[in-house]
Each structure stands twice: as structure tokens, then as C-alpha cells.
Amino acid sequence: MHEEDIIKRICLGGKPRDAAVKALYQGQAQPMLNFFVHQGVSADDAKDVLQDSFVKIVRSADSFNGSGSAKAWIWQIARNCLLDHLDKRSRLAGREVAVDAEQWQALEQRTAAPVRDVRLGVEACVAAGLEVFGAAMPDRAHALSLQMDGLAIEAIGQRIGRSVAATKEYLSQCRKKIQPFIAHCAELLAS
């Protein structure tokens, strides 16, 4: 199936759209993944960019006017998704701060000592850890907050722009990343 036919069938919706998306995926997913990785994106991030690309292709299929090559249009969307990802990564990297072991120890002492001294309780301890975590990794803290608020994985995925599977993996990584910020709270459970 040619790309022009794929775009037309995506616009039809229903089963024709499903078949067209499948055909598009079979024909373009691996070349796109290769392109993203070749451009310096990790394999995991490349999968996220691929997913974003397919979502945008499907959502904007009706805007393809046929004046140019459908394949070029599809790849332009993929390229734009890659550039968005790289831009976001660059902005996040600009906010990240490298912390050495001595700085981590000082951070742990600042967050842990008041909690131990005051015995605020587990909830307050975790909240304080989450606040520090939020300052260090705001996107990850936001995702965890949504989950703690009881939002379903699907709803969280929609809010953070990821698939259900990618959201589950991202939340799992977030839980691992927050551990150093709340590890000292376990002592409150023992007392």
C-alpha cells in the first residue's frame, strides 16, 4: 500500500484506519527507529519518538492535502517529533544539575534531619522527599503525583503524552529515581 493510500484510509477511520496504521507501521517503523537512533536518541527514547510520530500522523492525516509526497509528509512529521524530543531533552538537561557524592550527602542531611528531629510521620516525610524530588526532577515528580492522586495509567499517559506501556515504564523509572529522596522515611516505620 502506497503512503497516499495509507493517509486516505487513515482519514476514513474504523477498520480501514486500523489496517492503514498497521501497514504504515510495518513499512516505516524500523526505518524511523533507525533514523532516530542514528540521530543520537537512545533506543528507549526512539520508541517514544516513534509513538509520538504515529500519533501525530494519525491525528493530522486529514490535513494532508496531496500537494506533495505523502512519504515526505510522513517523514517530516517524524523529523519534527524528533526535533521536539531533542529540544525537550535539551531544555531538561539545562535544568539538571550534576551532584557529587558530597552534595548528595548534604542534601540527605538537609531533608532527613528535620524529619527525624520533629518526627513528623511517614506522610510528611514522604511529602518532604517528594518536594525535594520535584525540585530536582519536576517532570518525574508530576507523573508520580498524578499516580498518587489516583489517576489511571491511561489518564496519566494522556497528560504526559505517552502510551500506556510507556507510561507504566516511565512511572517505574520514576519510583526508582525517588528512592534516595524518601529512603530515610523507612526509619519512621521502625520506630
Image: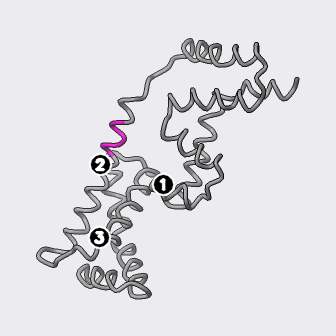
Secondary structure type for disc 1: helix
Secondary structure type for disc 2: loop
Dot 3 or dot 1, earlier in sequence: 3
Quarter occupied by the C terminus: top right
Determine crowd level at label 2: few under 14, some 14-19, many 20+ residues with C-alpha closer than 10 A.
few
User: Tag 1: residue type?
Assistant: Arg
Q: Nearer the observer, disc 2 or disc 1?
A: 1
Decide which of 155, 71 is in the foreground and name it: 155
Q: Where is residue 168 in the image (x, y as percent from the top left)?
A: 59, 54
Q: Mark 1 points at which residue?
A: 159
Tell me if label 2 and label 1 are in contact, CB under 8 Å. Answer: no
Relative height, residue 175 to residue 19 (above, below): above
Q: Is residue 42 left or right of residue 126?
A: left
Q: Position of residue 46 (x, y in %)?
A: 40, 54
The furthest residue to the right: 191
Dot 2 or dot 1, earlier in sequence: 2
Quarter occupied by the N terminus: bottom left
User: Tag 2: residue type?
Assistant: Gln
Report the magenta stretch's main SS: helix
Q: Mark 2 points at which residue?
A: 39
Examine the structure image and report whether residue 90 is included in the region drawn in magenta. yes
Tell me if label 3 and label 1 are in contact, CB under 8 Å. Answer: no
Q: Nearer the observer, disc 2 or disc 3?
A: 3
Determine crowd level at label 3: few under 14, some 14-19, many 20+ residues with C-alpha closer than 10 A.
some
The quadrant where residue 185 appears:
top right
Q: How far apart are marks 2 and 3 (CA)?
A: 24 Å
The residue sitting at 39% across, 87% down in the picture is: 16
The quadrant where residue 66 appears:
bottom left
User: Tag 3: residue type?
Assistant: Ser
Determine crowd level at label 1: few under 14, some 14-19, many 20+ residues with C-alpha closer than 10 A.
few
